[in-house]
Image (cartoon, grey):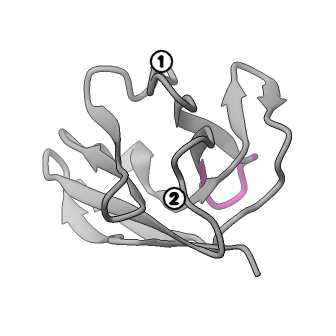
């Protein structure tokens, strides 16, 4: 049974940092592209970042580029999203998936989604 679980969310002040974790059960992350997504209240879900399978190339949405870093730890079977210089507009539920989103295009042959974790950034 394949499951993804995001964790690490919380409440921080603007300028603060959080590190989100995406843990997998039922499969190993190695060999899968993994994407982080977020959905703010009243807004559509948006792709935040993606790490590719195999060569671990990374992609970031313009809104987070330079502030967020995605990484993969094969030994722990986790994917992380380090979020620095957080802004109130980063407030959202963050989730991980075997899908990735590049602009408006959702890609990936596997369709697994984890429960999200709430990030709240206050001004």
Q: Residue under label 1, please give it.
A: 62
Report x, y in % for residue 54.
Answer: 52, 29
Q: Are marks 1 and 2 in contact (CB under 8 Å)?
A: no
Report x, y in % for residue 117.
Answer: 48, 72
Q: Secondary structure at mark 2?
A: strand
Q: Secondary structure at mark 1?
A: loop
Q: Is residue 123 left or right of residue 118?
A: left
Question: Which residue is at the front of the view, 122 or 86?
Answer: 86
Looking at the rendering, which quadrant does residue 75 occupy? bottom left
Q: Residues within 10 Å of mark 1 (few under 14, many from 20)?
A: few
Q: Is residue 22 left or right of residue 84?
A: right
Q: Along the polypeptide, which appears first: circle 1 or circle 2?
A: 1
Residue at (72% x, 63% y) in the render = 113
Residue 39 within the segment the image draws in magenta: yes
Looking at the magenta stretch, what is its main secondary structure?
loop
Residue at (73% x, 43% y) in the render = 99
Residue 42 within the segment the image draws in magenta: yes
Q: Which mark is residue 92?
A: 2
Q: Which residues are magenta?
A: 37-44
Looking at the rendering, which quadrant does residue 67 occupy? top left
Report x, y in % for residue 83.
Answer: 27, 45
Q: CA distance from mark 1 to mark 2?
A: 16 Å
Residue at (36% x, 21% y) in the render = 65
Question: Which residue is at the front of the view, 13 or 111?
Answer: 111
């Amino acid at each position: 049974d394949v499951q993804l679980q995001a964790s690490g969310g919380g409440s921080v002040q603007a300028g603060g940092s959080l590190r989100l974790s995406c843990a997998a059960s039922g499969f190993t992350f190695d060999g899968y592209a993994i994407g982080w997504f977020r959905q703010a209240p009243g807004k559509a879900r948006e792709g935040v970042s993606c790490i590719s399978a195999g060569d671990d190339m990374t992609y970031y949405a313009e809104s987070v580029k330079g502030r967020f870093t995605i990484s993969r730890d094969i030994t722990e079977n986790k994917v992380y999203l380090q979020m620095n210089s957080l802004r109130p507009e980063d407030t959202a539920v963050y989730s991980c998936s075997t899908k990735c989103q590049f602009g408006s295009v959702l890609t990936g042959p596997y369709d697994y989604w984890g429960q999200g974790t709430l990030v709240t950034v206050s001004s």
